[in-house]
Image: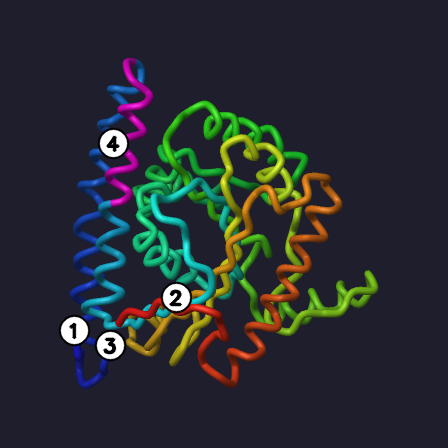
Amino acid sequence: MVSFRGMTLFPLKSAFSVLLLGLTLPPLNLAQLASVAVLPFSGRFFRRINRACAGLWWRFCVFCLEKPLQVKIAVTGDALPAGGENALLFANHQGATDPLALLPLAWRAGRLSSLKWFAKEPLKYVPFVGWGMLFLDCVFLRRSWAEDRAGIERAFARLLAHPEPFWLVTFSEGTRRTPAKLARNQEYARGRGLVPFRHVLLPRSKGFVAAVQSLQPRLNAVYDVTLGYEGGGAGLADLILGRTRAIHIHLRRHPIESLPMEGEALANWLLARFAEKDALLESFQGLRHFKADSSQTSG
């Protein structure tokens, strides 16, 4: 443990992980910035450079999770097809660790460098992380459909125009679940005549519906991912201080042909999946693992 005047700060393994990730991110981001020079000549090469840089740093993240931090990764549910595919992935959102928790899944599927994210608009102005996401054609949101629609359509057009594979990740609740937000969301659900959820928020469906409808020509499947944490919460402090012992990832794969394409039907489909998530997380509270037909567990 690292200590200062008798106060324990965090384990050495956490210090090593923070140092590794902190030292490797700036050089990779500089490489991404330098790649702008090739953009006028080859957009494909520009994207290849940025996918490689992002994939390498995210591989460092997976290494730190599984080796120095010794977090067990348990993947249950549907197996993914060999060879990879383009997918829209939606997950529950409990805290800042959630994006990191999805990296081992992408690594196992061979899609780590193909990740793209729905993210908050201010994030793209953050040095290093935000710049990198901007160069990866991530979808930035202001949480207002009227303001976001044009930008979302441009981002989808880029995904359709270029042959690179992608996993597009969205946290459809639109914000992290907290006790206060959950209470307000439950009251809102009751006001609409819906059964309130206990472990997730009602999903915001407009971005999801737009993604499915717009990207259908290149989408192979939609992945429903439910995240659960063993030994700690979903905050970065839980991870850094060694409280999180395991990350449980439950996956359901839905072929794009099985989804309805009409807007309201898609929104209702998404709501039904979040009802299933709520039930999964309810059982997780007692079992500390997800019930599943198949399991792929690594330590």
Mark 3 or mark 4, earlier in chain? 3
Q: Does the magenta stretch mainly form a helix, a strand or a loop?
A: helix
Boundaries of the magenta span: 41-55
**Could you tell me which residue is drawn at 46 percent across and 30 percent down?**
159
Q: Quadrant of residue 262?
A: top right
Q: In which quarter of the image is the N terminus?
A: bottom left
Per the image, the residue denoted by label 4 is: 49
Q: Which amino acid does label 1 sit on?
A: Leu
Per the image, the residue denoted by label 2 is: 75
Q: In this view, does 192 lie above or below 42?
A: below
* Mark 1, secondary structure of its residue: helix
Per the image, the residue denoted by label 3 is: 9
Mark 4 or mark 2, earlier in chain? 4
User: Residue 180: which numbered mark, if any?
Assistant: none
**Could you tell me which residue is drawn at 36 percent across and 33 percent down?**
135
Q: Which amino acid does label 4 sit on?
A: Ile
Assess whether residue 49 is covered by the magenta stretch.
yes
Q: Which amino acid does label 2 sit on?
A: Val
Q: Marks 4 and 1: in contact by CB < 8 Å?
A: no
Q: Quadrant of residue 215?
A: top right
Spatial CA distance of label 2 from label 3 is: 31 Å
Assess whether residue 219 is covered by the magenta stretch.
no
